[in-house]
C-alpha cells in the first residue's frame, strides 16, 4: 500500500487535515490511539473561520443541525440567545460585551456547535471520501529521513510500521510527534487551575444569574447548557494534572468560587486544565509537520482553539497535496508556518491577557473595569470581536489591497451569462479547488488560466472586482475592471507554472 501522508490523531484537526489532503489527491492514513471518539466535553462552540472551513467542504447542513440541537438544549435553561434577541455575540475574559452591532461582518460569527458533533460530521465526510482511519493505533516512534518517514505504531494485533512521504502530527496538546521530532515549544508555565463540568446541582437557582461571574475567589459561569459549569481558581497549578476529576473536587471548587451553598449530586463529565501557554517555533521540520493543539496550547477563553487548529488544517492540506502531486516545490510548505504562526501568536497573547484580568486581585479588577469601559467604544468592541473570532487574520503577501491575505466568507457569485441565477463561492469550492472570479473579460486572463493548473476553477462573473482565491479561501489577488497586474505572479506563487513558463522539475524536498 502506497501512503503519501500519515496523520497522527483523529481529533477534529487530524480529520480535516486528512480530508483536505484527500481532496488534493494525496493518499492518506489516519492513526488514532482511542478506540472511539472521546466523549469528554471540550469545545461548546466554534468560531467563524473554523465553521467556514467545514462549510466549504460540504458540512453546512450538518453544522446547522448541530446548532439547532444546541439552541434546543439552551432553551431548557431559558438561555437561548435567539429567544432573548441578544445583542451580544461573545465574551472577552468573561465580559460578555462583544456586540453584534459593532461588528463589520456580524453574520460571520461563532456558533454553538459542540466538539462531539463536529468530530462526527468530519468522520462522516472522511468516510465518504474513502479515507482510512485506523483506531486503537498509537504511534510510538518514527524516523524522518531526507526522502520519507518510517512510522511505527502499536495496533491491536501488535506493532506495525509503514513508510510515508510526510508525517503530520495532529495529536493534541501533549503531542508525541512534536516531542519526538524535537520541535521547540517555548511559552509560559501554568499558574492557575480551571474546570469544565456538566453536573447535577441540588439548587441551581443559587448560582443565578446565568453567565460569567467574578467573585473574591475566582470566576465561574453556569449555563447556557443545562448543568454546564466553568470555574477558575488562581491559586496555582494543580498538584497532579493527570489525577481524575472527582465529584467531591468539583463540589468543593464550586462552593469556594461561587460562595453558594450548593451540592453536586452527580457528575456527567468533568475536566481540569490550566493556563499553560506554548507555541512551536516552526510548524515544520523537514517532512514532519504539526497542526492544531500539537502546535499551540492556551486557555480556551473566547472559544478560539478549535477554530485556530481547523484553519491550520485547511491551510496545510492543499499545500501539502500540491507538493505531493509534484506541482509545487516543498518551499510552499514554509508559507504554512509564516501564515499560521502569527495567527496563533495573536490567540496566545489575547488568552494571556484574558487570564490577567480574570484574577481576583484589585489590580486585575481595576484593569478589568477599564477594559469593560473601553469596550463601549465601537472601534474597541470591533477590534476585540475580530481578534477573538479570528476575522482579523490577514496573511502578509505584500499587497496594499486590504482584502488580499484575508480569509473570505461565503458570498453569492453571479456567473456571466447566467441571468439572475445565483451561485455561491463556497459551493464552487466543495471539491477543494481554488477559484478565479474573473470580471475582466481580458484575453490575458484566459491565456493565463486556459492551459494552467487543474486545481483552479475560473468563473467569469458579471461584476468586479476579479479575485484569485486559494483552496483555503484566502484571497491571493484582487484586480479592478480589466486590470490583471499581479495575477500572473499570484498564480505562479500559489498554483504553479503559468503558460509560457519553462516546466521546472520539482523535487519533493
Ligand atoms: C475544557 C475545554 C474547553 C474548550 N472549549 C473550546 C471552545 O469553546 N471553542 C474552541 O474553539 N476550542 C475549545 N477548546 C479547545 C479545543 O477543544 C481544542 O483546541 C481541540 O480539541 C484541538 O483539536 P486537535 O484535533 O488539535 O487535538 P485533540 O482534539 O486533542 O485530538 C488529538 C487526537 O490525537 C490522538 N493521539 C494523541 N497521541 C496519539 C498517538 N501517539 N497516536 C495516535 N493518536 C494519538 C488523541 O487520542 C486525540 O484523539 C476547549 C478545550 C478544553 C480543554
Image (tube, grey):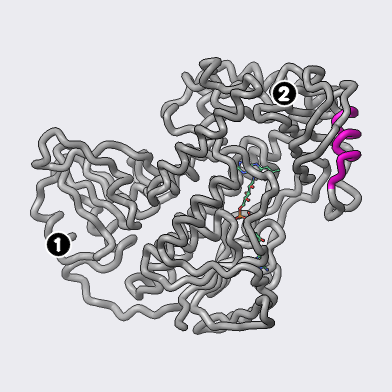
The location of residue 66, given as percent across then percent down, is 51, 39
Q: Which mark, by number, is residue 450?
A: 1
Query: Pointers 1 and 2 in contact (CB under 8 A)?
Result: no
- Horizontal arrangement in the rendering, residue 387 relative to residue 262 (left or right): left
Q: Residue at x 73, y 28 (%)?
A: 221
SS majority, magenta: helix
**Which mark is nearer the camera, 1 or 2?**
1
Q: Which sits in the foreground, 228 or 462?
A: 228
Query: Where 338 sits versus 439, above or below?
Result: below
Is residue 82 visible in the rendered image? The answer is yes
The location of residue 274, given as percent across then percent down, is 78, 45
Q: CA distance from mark 1 to mark 2?
A: 57 Å
Magenta span contains residue 46: no
**Alpha-carbon neighbours of circle 2 within 10 Å: few (<14), some, or many (≥20)?**
many
Choose the circle earlier in sequence order: 1 or 2.
2
Residue pointed to by mark 2: 368
Query: Where 212 sits versus 301, above or below?
Result: above
Q: Quadrant of residue 173?
A: bottom right
Q: Residue at x 44, y 48 (%)?
A: 54
Query: Where 370 sits versus 306, above or below?
Result: above
- Horizontal arrangement in the rendering, residue 422 relative to residue 378 (left or right): left
Q: Which sits in the foreground, 67 or 494?
A: 67
Q: Which mark, by number, is residue 470?
A: none
Q: Which sits in the foreground, 349 or 167?
A: 167
Question: Callout 2: helix, strand or loop?
Answer: helix
Question: Callout 1: helix, strand or loop?
Answer: helix
Q: Which residues are magenta?
A: 245-256
Query: Where 237 sits versus 497, above or below?
Result: above
Is residue 464 visible in the rendered image? The answer is no
Q: Residue at x 37, y 42 (%)?
A: 408
Amino acid at each position: 500500500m502506497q501512503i503519501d501522508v500519515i496523520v497522527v490523531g483523529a481529533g477534529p484537526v487530524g480529520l480535516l487535515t486528512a480530508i483536505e489532503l484527500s481532496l488534493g489527491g494525496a493518499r492518506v492514513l489516519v492513526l488514532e490511539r482511542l478506540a472511539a471518539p472521546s466523549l469528554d466535553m471540550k469545545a461548546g462552540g466554534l468560531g467563524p473561520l473554523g465553521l467556514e472551513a467545514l462549510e466549504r467542504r460540504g458540512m453546512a447542513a450538518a453544522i446547522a443541525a448541530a446548532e439547532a440541537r444546541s439552541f434546543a438544549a439552551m432553551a431548557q435553561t431559558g438561555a437561548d440567545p435567539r429567544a432573548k434577541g441578544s445583542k451580544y455575540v461573545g465574551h472577552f475574559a468573561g465580559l460578555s460585551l462583544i456586540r453584534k452591532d459593532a461588528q463589520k461582518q456580524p453574520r460571520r460569527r461563532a456558533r454553538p456547535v459542540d466538539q462531539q458533533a463536529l468530530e462526527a460530521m468530519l468522520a462522516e465526510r472522511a468516510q465518504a471520501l474513502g479515507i482510512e482511519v485506523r483506531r486503537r493505533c498509537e504511534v510510538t516512534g518514527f524516523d524522518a529521513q531526507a526522502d520519507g518517514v518510517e512510522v511505527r505504531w502499536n495496533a491491536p494485533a501488535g506493532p506495525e510500521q509503514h513508510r510515508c512521504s510526510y508525517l503530520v502530527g495532529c495529536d493534541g496538546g501533549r503531542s508525541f510527534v512534536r516531542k519526538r521530532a524535537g520541535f521547540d515549544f517555548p511559552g509560559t508555565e501554568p499558574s492557575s487551575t480551571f474546570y469544565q463540568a456538566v453536573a447535577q446541582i441540588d439548587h441551581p437557582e443559587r448560582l443565578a444569574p446565568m453567565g460569567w461571574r467574578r467573585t473574591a475567589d475566582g470566576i465561574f459561569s453556569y449555563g447556557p447548557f443545562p448543568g454546564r459549569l466553568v470555574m477558575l481558581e488562581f491559586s496555582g497549578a494543580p498538584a497532579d494534572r493527570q489525577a481524575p476529576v472527582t465529584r467531591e473536587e468539583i463540589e468543593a471548587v464550586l462552593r469556594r468560587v461561587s460562595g453558594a451553598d450548593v451540592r453536586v449530586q452527580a457528575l456527567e463529565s468533568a475536566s481540569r486544565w490550566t493556563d499553560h501557554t506554548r507555541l512551536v517555533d516552526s510548524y515544520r521540520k523537514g517532512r514532519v509537520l504539526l497542526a492544531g493543539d500539537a502546535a499551540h496550547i492556551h486557555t480556551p477563553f473566547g472559544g478560539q482553539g478549535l477554530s485556530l487548529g481547523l484553519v491550520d488544517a485547511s491551510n496545510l492540506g492543499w499545500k501539502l497535496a500540491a507538493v505531493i502531486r509534484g506541482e509545487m516545490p516543498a518551499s510552499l510548505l514554509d508559507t504554512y508556518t509564516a501564515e499560521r504562526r502569527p495567527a496563533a501568536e495573536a490567540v496566545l497573547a489575547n488568552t494571556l491577557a484574558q487570564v490577567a484580568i480574570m484574577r481576583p486581585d484589585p489590580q486585575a479588577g481595576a484593569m478589568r473595569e477599564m477594559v469593560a469601559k473601553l469596550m463601549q467604544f465601537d472601534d474597541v468592541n470591533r477590534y476585540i470581536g475580530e481578534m477573538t473570532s479570528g476575522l482579523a487574520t490577514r496573511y502578509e503577501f505584500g499587497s496594499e489591497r486590504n482584502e488580499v491575505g484575508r480569509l473570505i466568507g461565503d458570498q453569492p457569485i453571479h456567473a456571466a451569462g447566467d441571468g439572475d441565477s445565483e451561485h455561491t463561492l463556497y459551493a464552487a469550492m466543495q471539491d477543494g479547488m481554488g477559484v478565479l472570479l474573473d470580471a475582466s473579460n481580458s484575453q490575458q486572463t484566459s491565456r493565463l488560466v486556459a492551459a494552467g493548473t487543474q486545481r483552479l476553477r475560473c468563473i467569469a462573473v458579471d461584476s468586479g472586482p476579479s479575485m484569485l482565491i486559494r483552496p483555503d479561501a484566502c484571497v491571493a489577488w484582487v484586480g479592478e475592471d480589466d486590470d490583471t497586474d499581479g495575477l500572473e505572479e499570484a498564480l505562479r506563487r500559489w498554483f504553479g507554472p503559468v503558460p509560457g513558463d519553462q516546466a521546472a522539475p520539482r523535487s519533493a524536498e
